[in-house]
Amino acid sequence: MLGGCSNPTDTSETIASEASLVSVAEYNGEGYALPYGKETDQIAEEYREEIEAKTIKFFQENYQTEIVVHNVVGALNGATIFVESVGEPHFYTNAFVPVDEKEKKVMTDQISADNFQVKNAIKGGLYHMIFSDEFKKLDKHFESLVADDVTGKTIESLQNVGAMASKLPITLSL
């Protein structure tokens, strides 16, 4: 079973309960929420097309990389934008766009990303390209070890919450 993230000090958001648990095999990233993001999520959704266009431009200009935006999730003072590279090197990462809750405005001219995180994601994609044969062998080895009782993350969860999917608490139901 996979439980969503919650912040016990954040009383404005719903704390995870048994009702919010979902099987890892079925989780697709929908319903993913960040602390204090309820209002900014709604505002960001209104600006979704502009956010996507400016994020694509941001990654082209700063990382010479084509990306596709999979998800925009409200957060404290802004929204996190989950992206996936197009082609090689293949990677997932995210960016951030500030949101002014009072003015109900998204500052798409201030989109930013953690340079270290993006470069590490690109390096990971390059590493996978360079050692593709070795990764195929490793995949085969894992397949031989894994029984039907073990389930990994879905592609949809990686697309919708990117690297954050690796930070979600996961328990296996055997």
Image: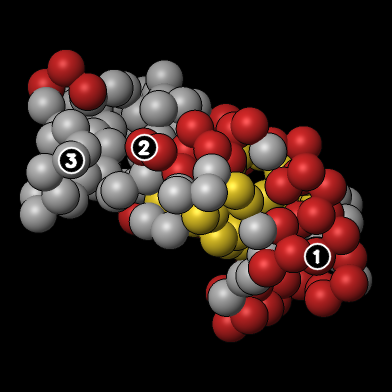
Tell me the SS state at disc 2.
helix
The first of marks 1 and 2 along the sequence is 2
Nearer-the-camera pick, 29 or 60: 60
The first of marks 3 and 2 along the sequence is 3
| Residue at 83 percent of width and 47 percent of height | 53
The label number, if any, that marks residue 12 in the structure image = 3
The part of the image, by quadrant, that contains residue 9 is bottom left
Residue that numbered label 2 is attached to: 38
| Tag 3–tag 2 contact (CB < 8 Å) | yes
Q: Is residue 12 left or right of residue 104?
A: left
Which label lies toward us, 1 or 3?
Answer: 3
- Callout 3 amino acid: Ser
- Tally the marks: 3
| Residue at 21 percent of width and 45 percent of height | 6
The first of marks 1 and 3 along the sequence is 3
Nearer-the-camera pick, 113 or 25: 113
